[in-house]
Image (cartoon, rainbow, N blue to C red):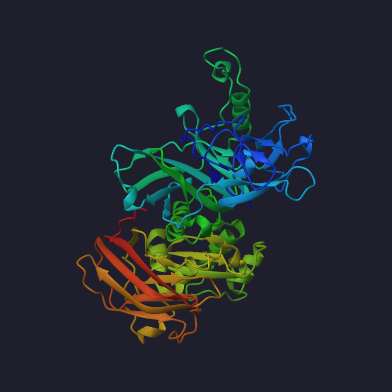
Amino acid sequence: MKKSTFKNIALTAVAIACGSAFAQFNSNINLSKQSWSTHEGEAYFYVAPPFGEKQLSACTFSHPEILSTSNEVKATNVQSMVVINEEKAKKLPAGDTTIVVQCGNKANHKANFIVKNTLPTLAKPFAVLESVHDFSGFKVKLNRPGSEVLNENMPVKFWISLLVDGENYFLTDKRGAYGHWVRSDGDDSELKHLVFTTQMAKNQSHEFLVDFDLGKKWSPSIAGLLKYPETGKVSPELLIADSIFYAAGQKPNGKIEKVLIGYQVGLDEVKVVETNWKNSSGIISASLHSEANRKYAFETLNKIRAITGVGYLKQNSALDNAAQAHAEYLKANPTEWGHTEKPGYAGFTGVNPKDRAKHFGYKGGDAGESIGPGYTSMNALMYLLGVPYHSRHLIGAANDIGIGWLPNLVGGIYGIMPVVTDYLSQNSQAPASDFVAVFPCNNIQVNVQYQGNESPNPAVLNGKKDFGYNSIAVVKKGQKIEVASWEMRDDSGNIIPTVVMTKDNDSNGYFSSHEAALIPLDKLPLTAANYTTTIKGKNNGISFEKNCKWGSVSGDTIPQN
């Protein structure tokens, strides 16, 4: 994987005098500089060999990729110019790197040169991608330390970098136009261009939207833009850079492996933080469904998964067909309900979800199925997300999904929405080992009109069927989540009676060690309300605490996320 770095373009180069004044070391070699920083200019220095040494070309360096004698400046018997490769120097580990300079064969003909790589290293994540918008991008929310909120008139500038299938993409703002994604070429992974938003330092929190599909390829067709205004001569640097933009500017496509946010307060050093995108499966297009209910279910579920931080599911036509076929089967056979089909019955395509997925040509692994009733797919989806045994599937680490929808299933009252997901290859969508996904969370809205009455009935309720909208917590499969405490409060701070279900007390045997649920003992009001949940415990033995704020909408209102 390539590592993205951010160049502080606002810093002024520091001029260092080079010439006859040399620093004396504990050897017979004299250097005009003892050290060089990645934030400084004048990327060269001079070396004077030991007295009597005539072969300046005989000088060697312990890091020849960083230092080399100049081929442009002819060496003399007195001194030779040594060039510092800035790009290679910036890829050194942060801190000081000692480079040994040796001229001649004698052991004492050595000197140390220090390269100080001062580029910022990744800090503890505090930039969060809260949600997607229109399935073409994401919303960035970045909180800066209070110590940085110093000057209300100081601008804060931002950089965005993606690592997509091993390729670095940078969001640029070319000449004040719309943003463009630029793919780096070769080893050039340095971000040199600002994202299109600038905010003020008086705000500790910053929010802005980032699109994946911004603008069109920019063409450097206006020759005047490539010329120095003073002389009218063409700038080779501009020509090369603009040609690269033209050739490489494009929408990223593939699995996102990392998202980095760089920011700069005024002329301070650019700071770089890694976001929570590491759990995402990639950049996913809008649903291909033409039917409104199936389209809504697919896109809304992916929005919810993105906000939760568990990654997108990919639409799969074979699973779509399997889910729709099962809906047709249930309608054709009113006495049938559940996830199995019987050979010889009308519409039979397979005994279980895996068989039906295989029947329609699915090439993945195992398949599981969730079925929700409702007047609309919104009702059905929100119901499935609010009951523990089904929400664990929809928030889990599956990869592919298929959705069916059939209205007027039972007496013209309910529709049915089977959701078929792939589970065998789920480790490719697994969250990071230190990540705890909780739904609802991150100020998400849900519709609680349909609550409780899950089949099978949650074991911890001892037969009680009416219960409130659940919260689900999931960690990486194979790890264990231990809940020390988990409470739920309404907007007035009142504690809502709940019960926690884990593998240890799930006598039905459906929950695994990496899953836990918080179940209100009574149904929540069917009104707009705000809630807070706080879970404390251990993820694979490591303590964690997570606070979640979320809200419900009234009646049949469609949640806005």
- On the question of residue 290 being in view, the answer is no
Above or below for 299 versus 59: below
Q: Which quadrant of the figure has residue 198?
A: top left
Residue at figure coordinates x 34%, y 78% from the top left: 485
Q: Which quadrant of the figure has residue 239?
A: top right
**Foreground of the two, 105 or 182:** 105
Task: Tell me where residue 163 appears, x and y as whole percent.
Answer: 58, 49
Above or below for 263 versus 371: above
Task: Tell me where residue 447 appears, x and y as whole percent.
Answer: 33, 62
**Foreground of the two, 321 or 400:** 400
Number of marks present in the image shown: 0
Q: Is residue 497 left or right of residue 328?
A: left
The outermost residue toward the front is 51
Above or below for 118 versus 523: above
Residue at figure coordinates x 41%, y 44% from the top left: 209
Residue at figure coordinates x 72%, y 27% from the top left: 72
Task: Tell me where residue 162 appears, x and y as whole percent.
Answer: 54, 47
Above or below for 167 versus 545: above
- On the question of residue 114 being in view, the answer is yes
Q: Which quadrant of the figure has residue 378?
A: bottom left
Task: Tell me where residue 253 appears, x and y as whole percent.
Answer: 59, 46
**Foreground of the two, 6 or 242:** 6
The outermost residue toward the left is 492
**Foreground of the two, 289 or 337:** 289
